[in-house]
Amino acid sequence: MIQVEGLTKYYGEHAAIRDLAFTIGQGEVIGFLGLNGAGKSTTLKVLGCVLLPTAGRVVIDGHDVVSNAHEVRQRIGYLPDVPPLYEEMTVGEYLAYVARLRGVTARDTTARVGEAEEKTGLREVDGELISTLSHGYRQRVGVAQALVHKPALLILDEPTSGLDPRQIVEMRDVIRGLKGTHTVLVSSHILPEISQTCDRLLIIHKGTLVAQGTEEELGRKMGGGGSIEVEVRGDRARALEVLKPFGAVDVDRAADGVVSLTLRASPDERPRVAQAVVGAGLELLRLDQGAGQLESIFLRLTHGQEVRA
């Protein structure tokens, strides 16, 4: 779906991004991570045909973003960091307006608007003015306008910005629901949401792509990083004995016969860990990938240690 080669963008003498190269397959959900000022929004704007690149080549669904920008725009849906909303319109009116701008026929507009509202949970506010909506619903309208014309590629720049915890969970469900039907490139500062939503990660730092791959792949490349959270019912000493061969073990909590531990090992070891725990006669209550792995990877990559894919 996306092929990027040597992508560079200068603002005057400042290089916002330099020599980026990556590919994204059809139907993937990709997380695009970086600190403020790393070049995320600039990259997304080039992919969205909002900015021209200084150098390099970007091809989306077989079309070059410079020489075939019109064809590219027909195939993408773009949500910038500030949703482009007309507050004097109702939700339904606005989405119908965007659909027509995107080339949807008058005959198909009502159906497309209904589908976009269904995917983003906007059915109940179809007749409400956008100016009266909460921030969370405005973000949903922003996503809906990006997908109302059924684009092959969705580019979402900080879709969870400013949302409360409940709204973040709801937006996560919206993005998950798009997987397969659309290719999705999503930028976010909410690391747990990226971890739970995306298939692969692209991490950019100071305008340069420093890593790409799945969370597990990046953990291995950084020296076998990662952790596994284990909760068992049984003897504490026995649990430590069983888990010790896999790596360093920390006991987080032990009460009422239940022991919660963090094992410093690759999440790929989970099947073997489960087998060992059950084989030792312990009752396995929970076995999860450590929640802090992506945070650890991100912090290490953005403080000078690079891991090339």
Image (spheres, rainbow, N blue to C red):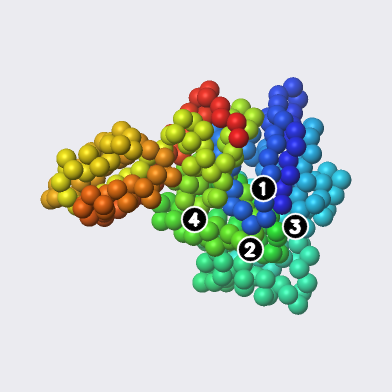
Q: Can residue 119 be seen? A: yes
Q: Nearer the viewer, mark 4 or mark 1?
A: 1
Residue at the (79%, 35%) spot, across then down: 56
Q: Position of residue 87 (x, y in %)?
A: 61, 58
Q: Mark 1 or mark 2: which comes first in sequence?
A: 1
Residue at the (70%, 29%) spot, across then down: 18
The residue that mark 1 highlights is 24
Q: Nearer the viewer, mark 3 or mark 2?
A: 2
Mark-to-mark CA distance, 3 and 1: 15 Å
The amino acid marked with disc number 4 is: Arg
* Circle 3 crowding by C-alpha within 10 Å: few under 14, some 14–19, many from 20: some
The amino acid marked with disc number 2 is: Thr
Q: Nearer the viewer, mark 3 or mark 1?
A: 1
Mark-to-mark CA distance, 4 and 3: 23 Å
The amino acid marked with disc number 1 is: Ile
Residue at the (68%, 31%) spot, across then down: 17
The residue that mark 3 highlights is 75
Q: Mark 2 or mark 4: which comes first in sequence?
A: 4
Q: Is residue 19 above or below residue 153?
A: above
The residue that mark 2 highlights is 181
Q: Is residue 157 above or below residue 249?
A: below
Foreground pick, 72 / 232: 232
